[in-house]
């Protein structure tokens, strides 16, 4: 049985969700949109949008970003 | 907390970006590997925080993203230092505070002595000072073992002494020796002679040989008991020991001058304050000459914490210049004073209920009220002298 290698397929992108209060995204390549209700981040395989209320980016570096606030929905989509 | 401290030292700013494309600004910032945090959107404005040193690098990026950027808040050491750059006294005070704290913390501020009833506290403090227990001395240089061993040699009344360091307080604990009852030395032979004239009432002789009988009249110097005892085996020498109670006649004379002098304060008070700090004393007065006749007393005002007296304070020495005043008293006043002095002498010389007043004579003689009282006393007239010796003349 072949070993599952999920990390290379993810293109270095990794996401961690802590309840509905905090989302940590590693390996994102930039910001598409940023409002209090929606934070869209560009990733190797598309755009990840975090929807919610009072969203704030706690920390933002070249390696990733941390979105805090009341998270309601996370969407994966194609880059426009 | 640690990250806050790490940001505080280089300083950080809160930035507000308005208009244009703030997302482009954030992308450019992350691409330039500039760390930002606390990114939050407020309507059209985007607010974020970055290190103060990175703010200058953000300006060209903001221009490219058509964003107008301004600084809202400044935090951290560089801004704090800039704000107080004209108040160097604060920095000097802070440095002085740290130095004084570091210098005073390991030193003895308070010395407490407990457990002494007979031994004077001053003697204990003097013995302890020789082993490093003194105000202002370093606590870690106290020779505890030396005090335990040498302290008992210096003070015969002390059986154990130690010092317990507790922060800045050195607690000296003392245990005193319990005096053993005195033992009678029977090795030195002696006699007992009469101290004064009298008629013997009762003899309590525990050692030695009686030379007089009860009811017999004796004069001062008469040998009452001898330690030289003749036995069948020859002469033996003992120490004479006992009491010979006799009826004696005594006279007390009290003289109170009608004209007398005494010293009285002039009313002037000279205060000489001295600032005391640990073992140092700084006089806060000029060294002006004082008149020779001066009374003085001290009043100490030390800082306290609860029941502990701190070694910081002011000791005021009050000097009261005095003058000699000549005064006279009436005969009645002199008589009353003579009566008081007579009562003091009676209690000092006689046993209670062992004397009776026989005659009293009082009057003014040569400018003084003289009171003479004769007594009939019952007292122990036997006094020990060396074997064959005489009554000492000063007795």
Image: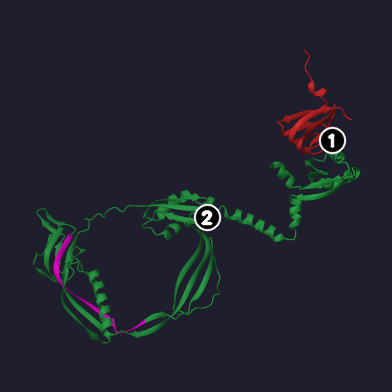
Residue B1 versus residue B311: which sits nearer the camera?
B1
Q: Residue at x 24, y 86 (%)?
A: B365
Q: Residue at x 19, y 77 (%)?
A: B373
Q: Residue at x 46, y 69 (%)?
A: B298
Q: Colour of chain A?
A: red
Q: Colour of chain B?
A: green
The disc label shown at residue B108, or none: 2
Label 1 element class: strand
Determine the CA span between mark 1 and mark 2: 65 Å
Prevailing secondary structure of the magenta residues: strand
Q: Where residue B217 appears, x then y in whole percent? A: 10, 70
Label 1 and label 2 in one chain: no
Visible residue check, residue B248? yes
User: Which stretch appears magenta?
Assistant: B241-261
How many C-alpha atoms fall within 10 Å of the one at disc 2: few (<14), some, or many (≥20)?
many
Q: Callout 1: residue from which chain?
A: A
Q: Where residue B115 appears, x then y in whole percent? A: 39, 53
Is mark 1 in CB contact (under 8 Å) with mark 2?
Answer: no
């Amino acid at each position: 049985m072949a070993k599952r290698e999920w990390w290379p397929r993810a293109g270095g992108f990794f996401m961690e969700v802590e309840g509905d209060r905090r989302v940590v995204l590693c390996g994102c390549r930039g910001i598409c949109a940023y409002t209090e209700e929606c934070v869209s981040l560009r990733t190797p395989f598309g755009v990840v949008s975090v929807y919610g209320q009072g969203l704030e980016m706690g920390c933002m570096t070249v390696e990733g970003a941390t979105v805090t606030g009341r998270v309601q929905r996370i969407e994966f989509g194609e880059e426009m | 907390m640690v990250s806050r401290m790490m940001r505080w030292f280089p300083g950080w700013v809160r930035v507000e970006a308005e208009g244009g494309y703030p997302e482009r600004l954030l992308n450019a910032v992350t691409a330039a590997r500039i760390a930002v945090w606390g990114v939050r959107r407020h309507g059209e404005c985007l607010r974020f925080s970055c290190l103060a040193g990175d703010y200058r690098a953000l300006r060209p990026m903001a221009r490219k993203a058509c964003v107008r950027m301004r600084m809202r808040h400044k935090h951290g050491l560089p801004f704090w230092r800039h704000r107080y750059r004209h108040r160097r006294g604060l920095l000097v005070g802070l440095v002085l505070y740290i130095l004084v704290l570091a210098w005073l913390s390991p030193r003895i501020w308070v010395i407490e002595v407990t457990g002494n009833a007979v031994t004077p506290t001053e003697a204990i403090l003097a013995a302890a000072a020789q082993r490093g227990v003194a105000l202002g001395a370093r606590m870690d240089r106290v020779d505890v073992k030396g005090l335990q061993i040498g302290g008992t040699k210096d003070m015969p009344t002390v059986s154990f002494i130690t010092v317990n360091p507790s922060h800045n307080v050195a607690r000296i604990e003392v245990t005193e020796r319990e005096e053993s009852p005195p033992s009678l030395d029977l090795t030195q032979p002696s006699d007992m002679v009469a101290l004064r004239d009298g008629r013997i009432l009762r003899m309590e002789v525990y050692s030695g040989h009686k030379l007089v009988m009860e009811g017999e009249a004796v004069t001062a110097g008469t040998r009452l008991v001898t330690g030289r005892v003749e036995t069948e085996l020859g002469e033996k020498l003992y120490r004479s020991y006992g009491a010979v109670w006799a009826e004696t006649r005594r006279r007390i004379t009290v003289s109170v001058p009608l004209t007398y002098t005494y010293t009285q304060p002039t009313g002037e008070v000279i205060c000489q304050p001295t600032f005391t700090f640990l073992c140092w004393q700084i006089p806060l007065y000029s060294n002006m000459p004082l008149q020779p006749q001066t009374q003085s007393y001290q009043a100490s005002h030390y800082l306290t914490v609860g029941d502990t007296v701190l070694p910081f304070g002011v000791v005021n020495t009050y000097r009261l210049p005095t003058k000699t005043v000549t005064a006279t008293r009436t005969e009645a006043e002199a008589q009353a004073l003579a009566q008081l002095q007579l009562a003091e002498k009676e209690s000092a010389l006689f046993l209670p209920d062992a004397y009776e007043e026989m005659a009293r004579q009082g009057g003014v003689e040569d400018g003084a009220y003289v009171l003479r009282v004769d007594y009939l006393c019952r007292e122990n007239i036997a006094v020990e002298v060396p074997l064959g010796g005489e009554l000492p003349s000063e007795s």
